Amino acid sequence: MIVRIMGEGQVKLADSHFTELNTLDDELLEEMESGDEAGFRRTLHALLDAVRKLGEPLPDDALEPSELILPAPDATLDEVRAMLSDDGLIPG
């Protein structure tokens, strides 16, 4: 699966990592629903760090279709809320 981190680029990620990423996504949703800004910021960074760590960056000139788009590390709570569907950032 190809994942895009807005403002950074694309990462190729094995489907086997979805369980770990879904756990972080669920935490992020809970923090967003409760308005926990500090928790949201911490979990967003943990999610992005996990994608970077577990994935393989694609070259900057690669233009693969992204199956998943994640917000930039500096995205606000409101910006991420606008990106979300009922399923969160990681389709489950």
Image (spheres, grey):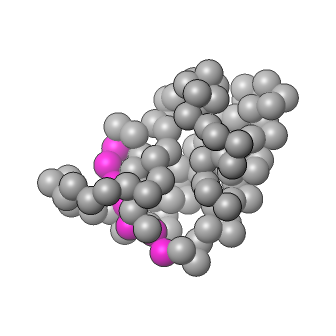
Residue 88: percent from left, percent from top: 66, 46
Residue ID at (34%, 44%) = 8
State which quadrant residue 6 falls in.
Answer: top left
Residue ID at (62%, 37%) = 84
Extreme left residue here? 61
In which quadrant is the N terminus drawn? bottom left
Q: Is residue 13 left or right of residue 28?
A: left
Extreme right residue here? 34
Residue 9 located within the stretch drawn in magenta: yes
Extreme bottom residue here? 16
Residue 39: percent from left, percent from top: 75, 35
Q: How many marks?
A: 0
Residue ID at (70%, 54%) = 24
Q: Nearer the viewer, residue 20 or 89?
A: 89
Residue 68 located within the stretch drawn in magenta: no
Is 91 placed above or below 17 here?
above
Residue 15: percent from left, percent from top: 54, 74
In which quadrant is the C terminus drawn? bottom right
Q: Is residue 75 left or right of residue 78?
A: left
Is 3 placed above or below 33 here?
below
Residue ID at (64%, 40%) = 85
Is 42 placed above or below 24 here?
above
Residue 43 shows in the view? no
The span shown in magenta is 8-14
Residue 83 shows in the view? yes
